Image (cartoon, rainbow, N blue to C red):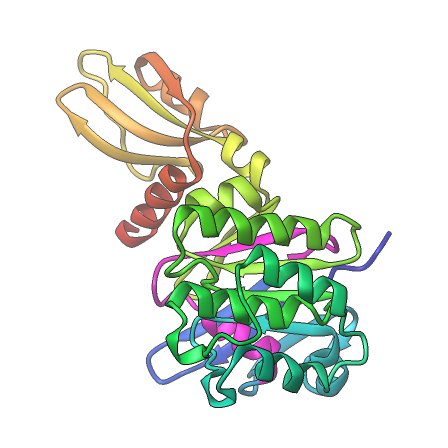
Amino acid sequence: MNSPAIEIQGLIKRHAAFTLGPLDLTVPRGAIYGLIGPNGAGKTTIIDMIFGMGKNDAGQIRVLGLDHRTDAVALKRRAAYVSPDLNFQVWGGVGKAIRFVRGFFPDWDDAYCAALMTAFQLHHHDPIATLSFGAKTKLSLLLALARRPAVLILDEPTTGLDAISKQQVFSELLKAVEDGERTVLISSHGLSDIERFADHIGLIKNGRMLLEGRTDEIVDRFRLVEFFLASGATLENPLPAGLTLLRGCENRWLALLDQHSAAQPWLETRGAQNLTFTRLTLEDLFVALVKETEAA
């Protein structure tokens, strides 16, 4: 069995007002992995740590079997990073930026670069300063993909992109991993995009991992459940693991239920009746879980 593309074990990074971890995270090879969480959850800190920006207080990060600190040079040759914050304007034009970056990577694929330019509607003579925000993001993605990196890490890659541009970007990402040899990690607030295109997800809150696994399995694991309480019945605390009460009015309640838990029989033995289950989207699940942890 292939080792994971990215493996984080027991990671801790302490800041003055925030502590990341202890955190474990596993990105399988050949996957598109969506790293999701509310603002301030620690997503950017994780990415920074992967690329050696800051020293971890505990734990280990390995990318393709390489240690993020002792093997930093080799890691950065095989992993690429894309963010809307990257600025290539200093090179003036698109063609000059491509020629500059190309010189650092022997595996640069000229034919693939040309195909990406066509797909992203970029031209060698385009002044970078006049590109739209979305076009600049596409240029950043082109400069990363044309290297043919084994691991591609993207921080909010669809910021500023319209629906058509998002489709183009994710189409290219799907092509990039179709041979099973390349891996993509996306940190994003675009939960509908993540649900459609990422086959694995990790949900973090307050520096901790809440859920991690295959996207379809995680979304299918939870249900919204509406139920009525029999006259005189109550739901005493503590509630069982896997049950989150979202709202209630008299004897009518709505809750989030983990189908892998013992929450349903617990409800039924305490007078819950007429249980109705509804499937959730990833966004529905995200909101319910984050609200639950905030209320805990």
Query: Which residue range is magenta in the image?
Result: 25-52
Which residue is at a point 35% across and 68% down the rendered structure image?
40
Q: Is residue 163 left or right of residue 226?
A: right
Q: Residue furthest right?
A: 1
| In front of the other: 25 or 77 | 77
The answer to whether residue 265 is visible is yes
The total of numbered circles placed on residues is 0
Say if 164 sits above or below 159 in the image: above
Where's residue 137, x and y in %? 47, 67
Which residue is at a point 45% across and 84% down the rendered structure image?
89
Which residue is at a point 37% across and 22% down the rendered structure image?
267
| In front of the other: 84 or 288 | 84
Q: Is residue 272 left or right of residue 140?
A: left
Q: Is residue 261 magenta?
A: no
Which residue is at a point 53% across and 59% down the rendered structure image?
121
Q: Is residue 236 left or right of residue 33?
A: left
| In front of the other: 225 or 161 | 161
Q: Residue furthest front?
A: 125
Where's residue 66, x and y in %? 77, 76
Where's residue 64, x and y in %? 77, 68
Where's residue 57, x and y in %? 55, 83
The answer to whether residue 6 is visible is no
